[in-house]
Amino acid sequence: MQTEIPTVIKLTRGVPPTEAFPTDLVIECFENVLRTFADILLQYQSALGFAPLRNALADNAKAEPDQVIIGNGSLQLLAFLAEAILSPGDTVIVERPSYDRAINIFRRAGLNVVGVPLEEDGVDLAALKEIVCRCVPRLFYVIPDFQNPTGVTISLAKREAVSELASKYNFLIVEDIPYRRLRYFGEDVPTFRDLVPERVVELSSFSKVLSPGIRVGWLVGPADLVQRIGKIAEDTYITPNMLGQGIAYEFLRRGWLTQNVERLKTLYRPRLQAMLEALERFLPEGMWFKPQGGFFVGLWLPEGAQVERVAKIAEEEGLVLSRSAGFFPDGDSSRFVRLPFCALSEAEIFEAIERLARAVSRARGNQ
Amino acid sequence: MQTEIPTVIKLTRGVPPTEAFPTDLVIECFENVLRTFADILLQYQSALGFAPLRNALADNAKAEPDQVIIGNGSLQLLAFLAEAILSPGDTVIVERPSYDRAINIFRRAGLNVVGVPLEEDGVDLAALKEIVCRCVPRLFYVIPDFQNPTGVTISLAKREAVSELASKYNFLIVEDIPYRRLRYFGEDVPTFRDLVPERVVELSSFSKVLSPGIRVGWLVGPADLVQRIGKIAEDTYITPNMLGQGIAYEFLRRGWLTQNVERLKTLYRPRLQAMLEALERFLPEGMWFKPQGGFFVGLWLPEGAQVERVAKIAEEEGLVLSRSAGFFPDGDSSRFVRLPFCALSEAEIFEAIERLARAVSRARGNQ
């Protein structure tokens, strides 16, 4: 593929590239679903979401429809969950690093957010046990597949151990799985919900497999909790946006979502490969976990390279990096860089990492 | 018009009827706007909303684009406003009765909600002054045109007096104007924003003039406040739903929104007339203010008729009434009934009020 390398490359937000969007199919689905369901999709509806889509999502999750609520993206459903079951001062555990916007939701709710270090196969179990014994959390927020921002997938053994811990210490596991279907290598691992459904709230979204702009995410959990969240949702926005839900439903009904996921995997797989090759080639002294899917590789810079300094120099090299502090509820973020690879061509990825390596080299040389 | 009268008539929620929805035009607008803006509408965007729509709304409001934020309906923007500028225990004033969901938003934010009685031409000024002197509010939430739930429109003289009071006592006027364009009789009165723009936050929505299911509302206010609300919005849902915004933009751009409003006025005007005639004919002992537009007539039942009792008997007569307590932040709600007229045919309206009158008569007879 011959592409022109831009003067400035952005390694910042984890957004899909424009070529990921199936515009023609979205238009076809919209026309079809609106002709069938205009009275419903253009009207106020239950805050729980569009019933046919709830049914389809429940089927996919092996749940009952009353265990599913659909919202304007999954992030706000996490905020509703916090409002429904947590009180200021409660402790929640997250991976360290974790999704910055989720950490922020917890902080806004006045919660005590504690991080557990990540390893190649998921959370450090000894550290998790130590924290849980010291201060039993209300919930553990985890992105088990191709984690944001590290790309880590938790092993089955660790999922089982965490599930046991949750049962023993009576806390909820909130698993956020928006990337799960974007597996480029290896085999699926059972979800936490597969293992201990009664202890799990699952969040997911169409943002990474169809479109973020349609703003459709959902939550699967105990029916009584879903009911409480539904009341909060109704009191907040009456009805979630119906048009995105209609399109998502039609994509599912036609089997087009599965086709789209396959297309995206074909698009993103070589980009992940390029990112891993580029890191091996240009930054062998760095540390990263090899993701098998998703949007991100998480890089720890070599010793002596501080990300703030590297980011400044990288801008001179034509590379924009995201700030890392937001991903860390606590602990040292000073050597971490999130590398989103889906929205760049392979050539851009190699160029970006070469620029990053030069910036690292300059930053270390300057110290 | 020959229509079959249903066994049970619902005089409950203020939703548009199915025939209000311009389904074919929505489909045409969607296809067109998505072909033009797919990269934007299917992607994550600024939490402030779709820029072309912000520009158009700002133009309409004689404001700058940075004074406009678009959300998933206007109710949540009111919640964001409360989060941005109010603290638990702060006093807010609302009309009595007022929109139940807005009162609920304020209550959830821990605010002290105080009601001011309504008169034919808007709030009782003497009562408002008395309350303001006793306990200066942070804001006055008001639905100045065809109020929900009474249908009252505030006179220009009272708008001016309230504006002066707001300037003198340094509180914000939050005017919610979703019904403003649905005027069936009489002439527009200037908005509060026309009178004292620097003291006003204006909320509006496409729910009543295009479709509720698209979930597009907006807020116009001081640019710094809009910026703060935008940060809260981003932290809550990243991006408001883009598809509804695209459709609303295209409706505005083509001049179709104005056409749709004219069509709706033609549809709703005779329904309001029917409601007022039916009340005169069947319930002359009741009290109501004659609305010149909007969705609702607010009825105070004749003395001796309690709404709880009337509602129970009405169900036996085949009429479902909405509960009234939610509209009253304080004071006596026991004789108030909200009568939404847009979603019923004229024949259904006459039949509904006849049934209501029978229920009132039975309730009074039974006391």
Image: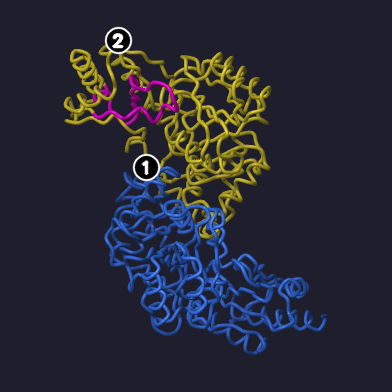
Chain colours: A blue, B yellow
The chain to which mark 1 is attached is A
Quadrant of residue B135 in the image? top right
What quarter of the picture does the N terminus of chain B occupy? top left
Which residue is drawn at the image coordinates 45% and 18% (left, top)? B185
**Rendered position, A194 above or below A26:** below
Q: Residues within 10 Å of mark 2 (few under 14, many from 20)?
A: some
The amino acid type found where label 1 is placed reads: Tyr
Q: Which residue is mark 1?
A: A44
- Provide residue A339's location: percent of width, then percent of height: 61, 75
Q: Is residue A236 above or below residue B113?
A: below
Is the residue under label 1 in contact with that under label 2 (CB below 8 Å)?
A: no
Q: Which percent across, then down, holds residue A222?
A: 32, 59
Q: The residue tagged with tag 2: helix, strand or loop?
A: loop
Q: Which span of residues is magenta-colored?
A: B320-349
> In the picture shown, does residue B168 fall above or below A241?
above
Whether residue B252 can be seen here: no
Question: Could you tell me residue B313's position as x and y percent?
Answer: 20, 24
Label total for image: 2
Label 2 sits on what residue type? Pro
Name the quadrant containing residue A336.
bottom right
Callout 1: helix, strand or loop? loop
Name the spot of residue A281 as percent of width and height, x first: 65, 90
Discs 2 and 1 share one subunit: no
